[in-house]
Every structure is written in structure tokens, then in C-alpha cells.
Image: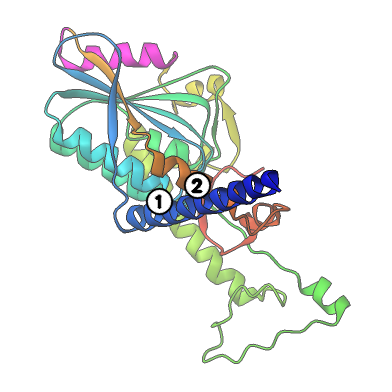
Amino acid sequence: MQRKKWVALLIVLVVFAAGLCVEFVSGAYDELAESPGFSWDENIVSGSGTDKIVQMFVNGVISGEQNATGMPSMSELLSEQLRRVEEDENVKALVLRIDSPGGEVVATDELHTRILHLKQLRHIPVVVSMGSTAASGGYYLATTGDSIFANPNTLTGSLGVIFNLFNYSDAANKLGVHQFAIKSGRFKDIGSPSRPLTDPERQIFQTLVNESYNKFVDVIVKGRNLSRQRVLEIADGRVYSGEQAKRLGLIDQFGDLEEATRYALSLSGSPEAMVVRYTDQLSISKLLLSMKQYWSNPDPLGLTRVLERNGSPKLLYQFMP
């Protein structure tokens, strides 16, 4: 009997503790959702002195969307880091380490504009260091660099735009599933996955793709000082190795992040400087918040991730094999 009482008490305590955790996470989530609270630690990698060389990392798909936990997007986080660089008079150069296949057209262009604004405002050099992949939108950002370093085996290029539309009309017809769109205009349901794409609709989408493509070409022409005709010849969507990219004038030198950082120091005009990185401050609330998606996973089979690329259609500067 005594043992049963202790078991019952233990169960009550566990339930109570679980309730506190849920309440805490919920409160933390609300707090961070209302104010993302960008908090950065400035970690010194090497060097000394008061002047700084900032290493900033663009890793993964470039997106303006928040993740599943509601935390800020990559675009928001990098923009905040750029703002910090902008406000720190001790920063004398920026090294942009890119390991990305690209991503959303809008998010990529906004970051590109933000970096150019920083260069114009602060007149500091930007040196790009390419990782394993710096393709499509990753290369779009690389054009902001005063010099681009890469490995001979880096995967780059994929210069162009893609717009994917998911269509299940054939499968729906076989299953006897039909969707009827009551619309206000001829093109209101343009790109509907429940019916075939018409030629006029395809032309509309192609016009959007062409506009974004021309912007990409302009960015390369200006950033790499190449003729428009030359860029049009090489910007056909194919990927290039670092070796090929150097021959085409898309990158400048072979070298790793450390070599790119040394070059940035030489451009900065400072005899010595600290090499620093911004890292997000870890807190209990952020840790629990990041685990929230695993505690209440609405998609245990991972089907959302499989179909994610076929969700809301977007113009993409992205390498998508």
C-alpha cells in the first residue's frame, strides 16, 4: 500500500513538471514570436587588436520563411548580422563564406541588396569564400565580393531561375477526384495542380522567369565585370566546377576560408585585426523551443518534407537536380 502511494505521488509530480515545461515553452514561444530577440556572441577566431574581420556564413537553402518552430528565417538572421557589421566601426572587412545551392529569388535579392548597401555605406571590402557548393542564388550573393575564392572542386554556376509547378491531374482523374474553380478571371487559378497547364499560362510564368533571369544576368555583369553577351553564353543553368569557373571568370582565386580571410585583411588597410564570428546565444527557452517540433510533430512520417518543394510555388535561384 505504501509503495502504491509513492508511485501515485511520483506520477502527480511528473504530470506537474510536464505542465510547467509546457507552460514555459509556450511562454518562451510567445515571447520569441513577438520579439525574435537576436542575441549574438562575438567569438574571436584568431588575431588581435581592436580592428575586426567578420566571417559570416551562408549555409543551406536561402529562405525568407521561418522554420517549423517559428524562429527567424535565414534571411532575417543574416540581415541582422549585416546590421551589426554596419554599426560596428571596428569592422574593417567582411568575409562571406557561402555553402549553399541558392534559394528563393526574393530572399536572395534582399540579402544581395543588403550587402551592397553595407559596402556603399561603410566602404569595407567583401571577400567571398566558396565552400562545397555556391550555386545559383549562392553565386548571386557571391557577386557582391571584391574577390571570390573557391576550391577547384567547388560546385558553382547553375546561373538561372526555376519555377516548379506540381500537377496531379492525371492521378486525380483516375481516382475520380475533380476540383471546380469558381473564379473572377480567366487566370485566377493559374497553375492549378488539378488540371493541365495551358499555353497562355505557361507564357505568363515564362515571362516571370525571364524577368528574374535578366536580373541575375545584370548582377553577374556588374559584379564580375563581364560583357552581357559573355554572361548569356555561360548562364544556361549548368553547374561548373571551381576549375571551370575560374577559366570562365566567375571566380578569382583558389583558396580556403583562411586564405580568403588573409586577403580580406590585406584589403582592409589594417596591419592586424581580430577575426570574429557571430554565434547565436544559447538559452533554455531557445533550446526548448527548437525541440518543440519533435514534441508535437504533426507529420511523424515526414511527408511534409517530401512534398515541401511542391508546395506554394516560388521563383527560385536554386540548384535543384
Tell me the SS state at disc 1.
helix
Tell me where residue 40 appears, x and y as whole percent: 29, 34
Query: Disc 2 and disc 1: Cα gap in Å?
Result: 8 Å
Amino acid type at mark 1: Ala
Label 1: few (<14), some or many (≥20) within 10 Å?
many
Residue for badge 2: 103
Q: Is residue 223 above or below residue 307?
A: above
Tags 2 and 1 in contact by the CB under 8 Å rule?
Answer: yes
Residue 68 visible: no
Label 2: few (<14), some or many (≥20) within 10 Å?
many
| Residue range corresponding to the magenta coloring | 255-271
244 or 229, which is in the foreground? 244
Q: Quadrant of residue 276?
A: top left
Q: How many marks?
A: 2
Q: Residue at x 34, y 40 (%)?
A: 78
Q: Is residue 148 above or below residue 10?
A: above
